[in-house]
Image: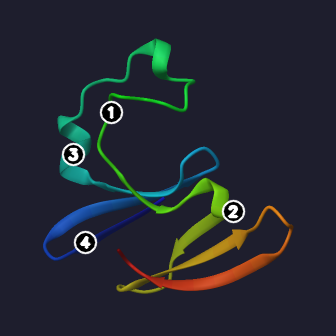
């Protein structure tokens, strides 16, 4: 998880195996409806904060860390087994 600010707004980048790499606005987290228990284990969740997909889970499993104030570094393991190291501008 990487926290950062861009254009006066606070964001969080989160990497996991079910959603890939996603970006959430911190303001949206506090405003979001609670996710009902029956949706917690499903892929199709309709509650919770809105998010933007940065890297789809089908693109590979990623690890993300801050590189500097403007960029993150991503270590992406593709389904084929190859591993790519990428530097990406903070979205």
CA–CA distance in space, label 3 to label 1:
9 Å
Q: Nearer the viewer, mark 2 or mark 1?
A: 2
**Which mark identifies residue 48?**
1
Residue 37 vertical position relative to residue 53 in the rendered view, above or below = above
N-terminal-most mark, 3 or 2: 3
Q: What residue sits 17% from the left and 66% below the top?
A: 9
- Colour scheme of the picture: rainbow
Give the secondary structure at mark 3: helix
Q: Nearer the viewer, mark 4 or mark 1?
A: 1
Left or right: 39 as drawn, with respect to 59? left
List x then y, in percent, for residue 40: 50, 23
List x then y, in percent, for residue 74: 60, 75
N-terminal-most mark, 4 or 3: 4
Q: Which residue in the rendered view is the most extreme toward the right?
A: 81
Give the secondary structure at mark 1: loop
Classed neighbour count for the residue bearing mark 4: other residues with Cα under 10 Å, few (<14), some (14–19), many (≥20): some
Q: Nearer the viewer, mark 2 or mark 4?
A: 2
Q: What residue sits 25% from the left and 52% below the top?
A: 26
CA–CA distance in space, label 2 to label 4:
26 Å
Choose between 43 and 16: the one closer to the eye. Answer: 43
Q: Which residue is mark 2?
A: 60
**Which mark identifies residue 5?**
4
Classed neighbour count for the residue bearing mark 2: other residues with Cα under 10 Å, few (<14), some (14–19), many (≥20): many
N-terminal-most mark, 2 or 1: 1
N-terminal-most mark, 4 or 1: 4
List x then y, in percent, for residue 38: 48, 13
Classed neighbour count for the residue bearing mark 1: other residues with Cα under 10 Å, few (<14), some (14–19), many (≥20): some
């Amino acid at each position: 998880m990487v926290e950062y600010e861009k254009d006066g707004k606070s964001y969080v980048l989160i990497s996991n195996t079910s959603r890939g790499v996603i970006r959430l606005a911190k303001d949206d987290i506090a405003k979001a409806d609670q996710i009902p228990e029956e949706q917690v284990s499903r892929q199709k969740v309709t509650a919770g904060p809105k998010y933007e997909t940065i890297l789809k889970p089908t693109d590979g499993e990623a690890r993300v860390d801050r590189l500097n104030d403007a960029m993150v570094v991503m270590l992406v393991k593709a389904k084929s087994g190859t591993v790519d190291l990428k530097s990406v501008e903070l979205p």
